[in-house]
Amino acid sequence: MDNYTAPLPNNAKALSYPAEYTSTLLQLFIENLGQDRRQQILDMGPVCEENIMFFAQLVKRHNVCDMFIRLDRSRRKDLPSKHLWNHLDYPHQSFNGIHLWDLVDHLNDNEVSKLIELCHFMLKPQGMVMALTFEAYSTPSLIHSFVIQRNYRIAVRPQYHLDLPWYYRSNRELTLLLATFRFVKSFLYRNGIREFLFQRV
């Protein structure tokens, strides 16, 4: 297990948006996929052409299931959360990696537990799950998509059409919710974004 916390900036409370940064754990996520191009991953973030192009060079199939827009629609229509999971009806052990981005920030504990149960079902043994979350001081007022650039640089793109609640959780709370996976590494960046990497055993 490995945790790293970068020093916080002096103006931490003034940060109200996720500034661009270089992702340490995205590189580890990609390295774990290895050189086998038969690998398949599931991306649950907003549809992003740059990310599709990035992963197309690395894996056989980059599946995108935008759970953010589905969650937004479900909440606007006041539908039970069970309708949300119908979109994740992939076969058992379909994927070598799953990218959640900051989806868990917008789900209550019961919804996170169901999401993790589905991820465990969909992942192959030794498959990886990567998630982002925000520290309390840096929670942005808008939902963002995270756009992968060269050299694992992550830029942000506002999603003005989305209106979702925020749920702050400590590192301990997050790792307990994902306890069915082996914790690999976490990293806190100066902009308040926390990255977590887990593995299915």
Image (cartoon, rainbow, N blue to C red):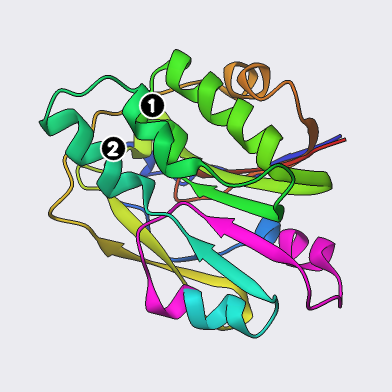
The relative height of residue 117 versus residue 43 in the rendered view (above or below) is: above
In the picture, the quarter occupied by the C terminus is: top right
The picture places residue 49, in percent across and down from the top left corner, at 39, 78
Q: Residue at x 46, y 33 (%)?
A: 104
For residue 65, what is the image quadrant? bottom left
Which residue range is magenta in the image? Answer: 27-51
Label 1 is placed on what type of residue?
Leu
| Residue closest to the eye, 164 or 133 | 164
Q: Residue at x 74, y 46 (%)?
A: 93
Instruction: Assess disc 2: are there few (<14), some (14-19) or many (≥20) residues with their C-alpha within 10 Å of its C-alpha.
Output: many
The picture places residue 94, in percent across and down from the top left corner, at 70, 52
Contact flag, marks 1 and 2 (Cβ < 8 Å): yes
The relative height of residue 52 versus residue 181 in the rendered view (above or below) is: below
Label 2 is placed on what type of residue?
Leu
Q: Residue at x 32, y 29 (%)?
A: 83
| Residue closest to the eye, 134 or 190 | 134
Q: Which residue is mark 2?
A: 71
At numbered mark 2, what does the secondary structure look like: helix, strand or loop? helix
In reply to whether residue 62 is colored magenta, the answer given is no
At numbered mark 1, what does the secondary structure look like: helix, strand or loop? loop
Q: Which residue is mark 1?
A: 107
